[in-house]
Image: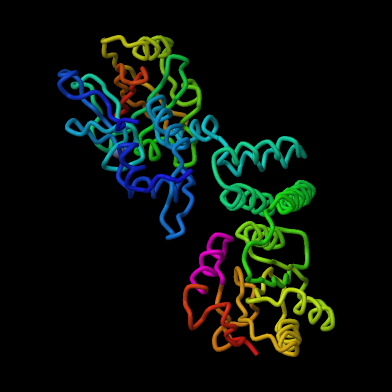
Amino acid sequence: MTRLITQGRDQRQDAARFCTHCGVVTDDAPQRVCESCGLGVVLHCARDAAPRPGASFLIVTTDLRVTGASAACGEMFGETFELVGSPLVDVLHGDGALPRQVARAAMGSRKVATVWVRTAQHGRPFRGRIVACGDPPAALIVLS
Amino acid sequence: MSGIRTNAAAELLGVSPNTLRSWERRFGYPTPGRSPGGHRQYELAELEALRRALLETHNISSAIQVAQQRGEGPGSANRLLEAFDRFDDDCADRFMEESLALRSIERSVEELLLPAIELAEERDGREAECEFACRWATGWLHAARRVAPPASREEGVLLFDASTKLGSEMLHVQALELALRRAGYRVLLLSVALAQERVSRAMRALDPSILVLCGSGATLDSVGRLVYSVRQTGSQAPLREYRGSMPVSGMHKVPSLGDSPTEALRRLRDLREQPSRSIGARAPLRAS
Ligand SMILES: [Zn+2]
């Protein structure tokens, strides 16, 4: 069994690696599991769309189900709200194009989309940046 | 099959040993066994399942869930618990068989059977499932005892069982009896509540080198009567307690034989190897 690592930096010059839990970017560490928090896996996304440490973001697969949520989402959605495993429609409300934009990113589109979304818990809208990430392929929605 | 130590397991998963231990505390997985020296020992199958799941998921808790479902191999007490909940003894037998293909009877009992019984016992409103589990486990341990090799050691171990009801403590005692028999000791398991006359006959028949009080439920009175009866026979065999069965502590503390069958076997071996306190040398009873 070989050591569990993600692809090296040299293979993805334009990509950043971030932790799905704490959001820390771990470019120099090839590990699959975040060395900072030990609670997130390390995924790639376009460097200019990478979340910042402590950011609120969701990982959503092509079937529009949330498969990851950063620690900071607790504040936005409520600590007890079960994000992982929920359908996206139960978590974020946006305009009619949201599902298509998320699915497209989850399928690996290089386009970065910006949308306005609301959560069930907050009345005010958040800006969401949707970008492809992986592996496995998914959409990253960074909320701010 | 020997387990994988923490550092090597952490290395295989590309995490620090601290992260691995924190997952165990937080998620209860991976679930290492313990070496005789008390070190964590991880199973390759569990690590492999987790490793694959980490590559297929987007967070640790999902990876652990996937690994548990998929990698729930012979090592999982939860899987045995599910068989109890279905009242399915064939399935429970099969899980034990699968476990025996990978590890010893002792480890299968300590890492699978007994934890599954404890899980069954912890739940409210599942008394029927728990009783089924305890009866099945009793039958399984008896069957294993029947095929244990004949005694190959001179030392006899007399176990006094203070358990009063069918449950995990009673099964811990039966598991100890099985392990001792399999290790070649001559073993007799008797109830603490035995009449004095029957203890004398048992003492004559076994001529034990050590007496072990086990099972919860002993009272100071019953232990006192027992020790008196044993003394009356002239035996100087030392007394040990198992899994905190002694109702007193402090000045009257009786040395422990540990909490698990493998620990008990190790302590018996240590006792044998210390000439002054040898169980063969018949050191005097410490509790009187
Ligand atoms: Zn992290």
Q: Nearer the viewer, residue A117 or B185?
A: B185
Up-down: is B88 above or below A89?
A: below
Quadrant location of residue B177?
Answer: bottom right
Closer-to-camera residue (B128/B77) = B77
- With respect to residue A35, does B212 lie above or below? below
Q: Quadrant of ligand 1?
A: top left
Quadrant assignment for the N terminus of chain A: top left
Residue B272 coordinates in the image, percent (x, y)? 52, 73
Magenta region includes residue B258: yes
Spot occupied by residue B189 in the image (x, y as percentages of width and height): 74, 67
Seen at 70% across and 85% down, the residue is: B227
**Image quarter (top left, top right, bottom left or bottom right) of the C terminus of chain A:** top left
Residue A113 coordinates in the image, percent (x, y): 29, 14
Q: In the depicted view, which residue is nearer to us: A2 or A80?
A: A2
Task: Specify whether B264 is left or right of B14.
Answer: right
Can residue A110 be seen in the rendering of this structure?
yes
Q: Nearer the viewer, residue A66 or B10?
A: B10
In the displayed structure, does residue B113 sit left or right of residue A27?
A: right
Location of residue B157 (image quadrant): bottom right
Q: Which residues are magenta?
A: B257-271
How many badges with numbers are in the image? 0
Query: Percent x, y for residue A109?
Result: 30, 9
Q: Residue at x 58, y 38 (%)?
A: B101
Query: What colouring style does the render use?
Result: rainbow
Compared to residue A93, the image places residue B230 above or below, namely below
- Does the rendering let one see residue B125? no
Does the magenta segment cover residue A133? Answer: no
**Main secondary structure along the magenta-highlighted residues:** helix
Q: Residue at x 71, y 89 (%)?
A: B234
